[in-house]
Image: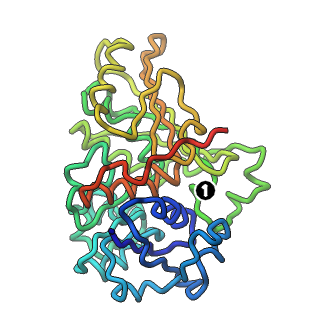
Amino acid sequence: MIKAAIIGATGYTGSELVSLLLKHPDVEISMITSESRKGELFSDVHPQFKNICDLKLRTANDIDTVNPDVCFLALPHRVAMEFVKKWKDKDFKIIDLSGDYRLSSAEVYQQWYDKVHDTPELVPEVPYGLPELYKEKIKGSKIVANPGCFPTAGILALAPLLANNMVETDSIIVDAKTGTTGAGIKSSPTTHFANVNDNFKAYGLKSHRHTIEIEETLSDSGKEKATVQFTPHILPVDRGILVTAYARPKMKITEAMLNERYRQFYKGQPFIRLRSQVPELKFVRGTNLCDIHVTYDERTNRILALSAIDNLVKGAAGQAIQNMNIIFNLDETSGLHIIPLQP
């Protein structure tokens, strides 16, 4: 059995990791940590786990007493890198769910996260953990940077177009909607029920940190600099992301050509479902699936690529487990055979 430690398990992503790992046939949860609530039971923090997971929360300083094989860092950006710095020479693998190692360089990170990086030498070396694009780099890696939820949905919607040099790269639009869990478990005016209920709004215009993550990965896919207009919106739902992306073709295209390129690009990818209908959040709720629909509007000469994921699963915990499976040479889908919850 693979011994797993979850560092920072009191948030939504941490609890989702526990929920998924408890059902994984090859994993044993050896430690769950919380610095603010150490000594309490995990099920005291997340009551849905009563009599299912009653492990006592410990401090991350106990890591050497459990000798894990893999450590999931479910920590905020700017904090996760402190643990990577301390543990980078330990024997266990590290899957970081923060944004601290997702970008191309420490300089780019400082520009977008307003923080000098603790381990600048590692930033360009850590593979970006989007298995559909970088599976070979993830295999056997010591540290993996788990992608953000918005970038996962946006990149997967657009990557086949960039990889096949099919679109103009200076005018890509990613219009994204998310459930409130994407903002984390801590309450704020943005996620307060009275502000979210019966409401719908955009935020982070022109400056959201996920913009650069999407741009860099799409640029790498197409080997040409991509400029992305990314606008996120918050929906009055608890989980899920729906992306509608727009791009102008470089060439004369047909609907059949588009669909064939997507089929070839995602051939053999177990969590990608190419749909003939527009994806919906409930089609993927609670799963590691990404549903994609692509079409061409002759009137406007635009390609429309839509994707839907669960932000807590394919956008966070599920993708982290998918990366773990790849690192340890397990079946990529192990522990992630989940039927969408509908209705």
Q: Which residue is mark 1?
A: 181
Residue 26 against residue 115 in the figure, above or below: above
| Residue 224 screen position, x and y as percent | 23, 38
Residue 130: x and y in percent read 33, 49
Residue in front for this viewpoint, 98 or 9? 9
Q: Nearer the viewer, residue 245 or 30?
A: 30
Left or right position of 22 against 250: right
* Residue 158: quarter of image: top left
Looking at the rendering, in which quadrant would you find the N terminus? bottom left
How many marks are shown on the rendered structure?
1
Q: Is residue 239 above or below residue 106?
A: above
Percent coordinates x, y for residue 142 in the rendering: 23, 67
- Residue at 40% in and 71% down: 115
The quadrant the C terminus occupies is top right
Q: Decide: is 236 above or below 116.
A: above
The colour scheme is: rainbow
What residue sits 42% from the left and 16% below the top? Answer: 301
In the image, 176 versus 87, the foreground residue is 87
The percent coordinates of residue 215 (x first, y second) are 35, 45
Residue type (three-letter) at the residue carrying disc 1: Thr
Q: Looking at the picture, tell me which residue is in the foreground, 341 or 226.
A: 341
Would you identify the image quadrant in which residue 15 lies? bottom right
Residue shown at 33% from the left, 72% from the top: 117
Instruction: Give the SS element for disc 1.
Output: helix
